[in-house]
Amino acid sequence: MGLAKTCEPQQIEPRISRLWEDGRYFTPDVDHQRKPFVIIMPPPNVTGELHMGHALTATLEDIMIRWHRMKGDAALWLPGVDHAGIATQVVVERQLANEGLTRHDLGRERFAERMWDWVAKSRGAIMHQHQRLGISCDWTRERFTLDEGPCKAVHTTFVNLYNKGLIYRGNRIISWCPRCHTALSDLEVEHKDLGGHLYYIKYPMARGKGSVIVATTRPETMLGDTAVAVNPEDAKYKKLIGRKVKLPIANRTIPIIGDSAVELEFGTGALKITPAHDPVDFAMAERHDLPLINVLNDDGTMNNNAGSYQGYDRFDCREAVISQLRKEDLLEKIEPYSHSVGHCNRCNTIIEPWASEQWFVKTDTLARPAIEAVEDDRIKIIPEQFTKVYLHWMKNIRDWCISRQLWWGHPIPVWYCHDCSELTVSMDTPSSCNGCGSSQIHQDPDVLDTWFSSALWPHSTLGWPDNTEDLGYFYPTSVMETGYDILFFWVARMIMMGIENTGDIPFHTVYLHGLIRDETGDKMSKIKGNVINPIEVIEQYGADAIRFATTMGTSPGNDVRLSYQRLEAGRNFANKLWNAARFVIQSAENHPNDTTLNPDSLPTEDKWILGRMERTIVRVNELLEDYQFGEAERQIHDFIWGEFCDWYIELAKLRLRSGTTPSPMPVLLHVLDTSLRLLHPFMPFVTEELWQNLPSKDGRASSIAIAPFPIASNEYIDPRVESEMNVVIEIIRGLRNARAEHKVEVSKWIEAYIRADDESAIKPHATAIEALGKVRPLSIQQKSESSISTDNAKIIVLADADVVIPMAGMVDVNAERQRIKEEMAACETQCTRLEERLSKEDFLSKAPAHVIEKEREKLVSIKSRLEKLKQRSSELG
RNA sequence: GGGCGAUUAGCUCAGUGGUUAGAGCGUCUGUCUUACACACAGAAGGCCACAGGUUCAAGUCCUGUAUCGCCCACCA
């Protein structure tokens, strides 16, 4: 049974997946004889389906892992999924909403059951979708952030950091999402410039006349004001410090304080202070010992501190306050004002700064070694420009709010006592208070930020805090490959926590890829409807095509615009390879005895393709070492399509048909086999399927996935062979060019003469030139035996040989004269330029010898060409 | 307000100091030539954003400018 005429991924992929699964090729053993190469996969959220970003991540990581596995390393790629706190809770809450329920209707326990039902479904779906991409990770080691092991790691870390004073609880300003009902870290707040207003409000002096005018963008927060601040250097207000103003609407009296944080130039120079709802004000309140008045509920409505506005939504309250102020003639003016407003990065709701009791990680101590690790190059970031970004963030890091008011996540291992103020922080559930021994204790109801467990991922997945064999062998890991958008969220925190927990860096290299965008450069989003679903694409174009489309020709850190054209290009390349292989395999069936490659008697084209392949292998290995996957892939693509298929196979066909010896069969098979192995990390399915169909299987690995990656021997790299073949290729191109230019019918055979300086270099290729240039007969002449009639001849001048094709009635001698004239002019210009360069003292003394030599050779060849052009020109008269 | 990136063919992008700057897609001309029309053959198409500088040599390094994009930042 032969191969299908077209590459059909839908037929191939399931079969190959099974082959890999049955072979257990992707589960490495701890083997101290071998070098480990380890990637811990960024765990996708258990929110549901994979998107294109995951496909890109998976592809890049698979390229690295497959390459190292083929090189003989113990390649471990550990997959997993993330419980993804808010994101997943939102998904399940939305399902409940469809049933007319909220999580409160169910209660914590039943809600947790729903969550785990969802996880079971989603976790399997993610694994299945990943497998369809053909990725070679070790599913036996798959982890979930809420598995027992990672949970133990989380608790251990929390307890350790608490005991070291690096985790603390405090009443501080945090960003609050009124829709998610939870605190967020600074990173989870997205700042967007919004067109708003700046409201100028009069605060009348408590005693005497006059007022102080303050400017604010959020007038509703004035209900929580506890002071007005001015700059002590401000001549205008200096004398007011210490006096009091009457807070309108609330009818409280609040002091005027002096603080240098107030900008003289901004607004009116007087600042209303709302410590419970603004970070700057909060800091100022701490300095001046001002009271905090919280006026907001957790859902963004006003609380009982807002007096008559209690129950108002914050934005309705703003309107109401403004109209009341207007009534009282306390609104000086309203100016349009564009400013940056924080939004929840999950639900896009405008966040509120809100003073509340939360847990924090003290980051400065943790950041120091994380900075050093990157500065002294123990951790290398690719592309390099992100090193600066990382260091800048790390050096300005602020404490990390880790408590979330959600029901889904790692519970905080802290218990409060009803009878005393002592906290019990413990790995295991305690039965009594550490301080007074009371059994009246209850656990903190909050959970940890999802990124807290993610920060431990590289070591928690390998078994930490237990001293497992995997941890000892596979940690530190090799490469952390992820998107640049989570450099701070994840990478930075993994470095801090990895060093803190294990004393060692979590990975040696950080490879950051760009974002997948649509063909117009927009981010893909469900709302915009421009999402390309990877599974649909796999079904339509095949997994190899999607892998090709997302990585071919891309470079680290740069965004990828994905289009259907790119996907088609991937599919087309797979099909091209498929058919080339099909040709080779079928030919091998017809020539079963031509199997041994004899290096001593190879024709030029054999040596040429082997040499070109070796060059490709050298280059590809260099590029892979250097994390230039897109460029490596392009090199392989260009070699397979542009050299192997376009030239070598075409030349080989002629020899196969005529039965010439030596047969090209061994070279065809060798180049195909090597090409498949070179390409395998990039396009695993089609290469495996074809490799399984290669005729000789003696002593070979059972899967291309564990076959050796090609290494160049440099045996066949020979510039003389390359230049000889280049002449042949140029002659053939010239002939085809001439035919096309003169619209000679494809079926028509024409005569041609080649005038060559070195007849012996061309003679062996005469048959090839005849066949591929479709000329017959072809005569090769010494340069001296000139004088070919030009009246009815079309003349083509080639680099190192002249080709003369007599074609009665088809010649335009004038056009040819013109062409030659133009080419001569171009040659002369270049000649002059080269002569100038070669006469410059500086060039000769400073440029490296091989560059000078090259320029000299170039000059010689151009001069000889010029000679030929002159001769031709004179023949034409 | 700081920082980073981009600017190369009609479009999307490679190009990591050294020939005449490349690829895919698109366009135009031919061709179903026994591996492949998801293909083959050929062609057209570039002041490498702009201005200076360094260098024997610059798309590539430096400085500045412009446009676009991104990240960070507590001026209400």
Image: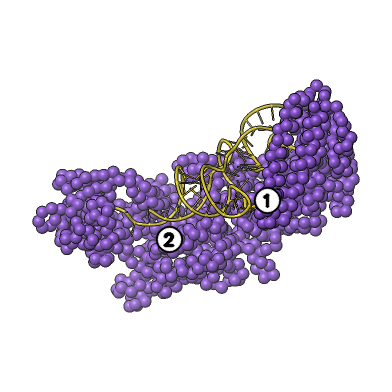
Chain colours: A purple, B yellow
Which residue sits at x=80%, y=56%?
Answer: A715
Q: Position of residue A5 (x, y in %)?
A: 74, 39
> What amino acid does circle 2 point to?
Asp
Label 2 neighbour load within 10 Å: few <14, some 14-19, many 20+: many
Dots 2 and 1 on the same chain: yes
Mark 2 or 1: in front is 1
Q: Is residue A583 visible?
A: no
Which quarter of the picture shows residue B37? Answer: top right
Which residue sits at x=87%, y=46%?
Answer: A663
In this rendering, would A122 be left or right of A851? left
In this rendering, would B51 be left or right of A29? left
Which residue sits at x=80%, y=30%?
Answer: A874
Q: Is residue A444 above or below residue A841?
A: below
A629, B23: nearer the viewer: B23
Q: Earlier in the sequence, mark 2 or mark 1?
A: 2
Q: Position of residue A790 (x, y in %)?
A: 83, 27
Q: Position of residue A252 (x, y in %)?
A: 16, 57
Q: Is residue A759 above or below residue A25?
A: above
Which quarter of the picture shows residue A580? Answer: top right
In this rendering, would A679 be left or right of A513? right
Q: How many marks?
A: 2
Residue with the most extreme bottom position? A436
Residue at which label 1 appears: A840
In this rendering, would A184 be left or right of A4? left
Label 1 neighbour load within 10 Å: few <14, some 14-19, many 20+: few
A77, A647: nearer the viewer: A647
Residue at which label 2 appears: A449
| Chain name for mark 2 | A
Which quarter of the picture shows residue A271? Answer: bottom left
> What amino acid does circle 1 point to?
Lys
| Chain name for mark 1 | A
Q: Position of residue A243 (x, y in %)?
A: 15, 61
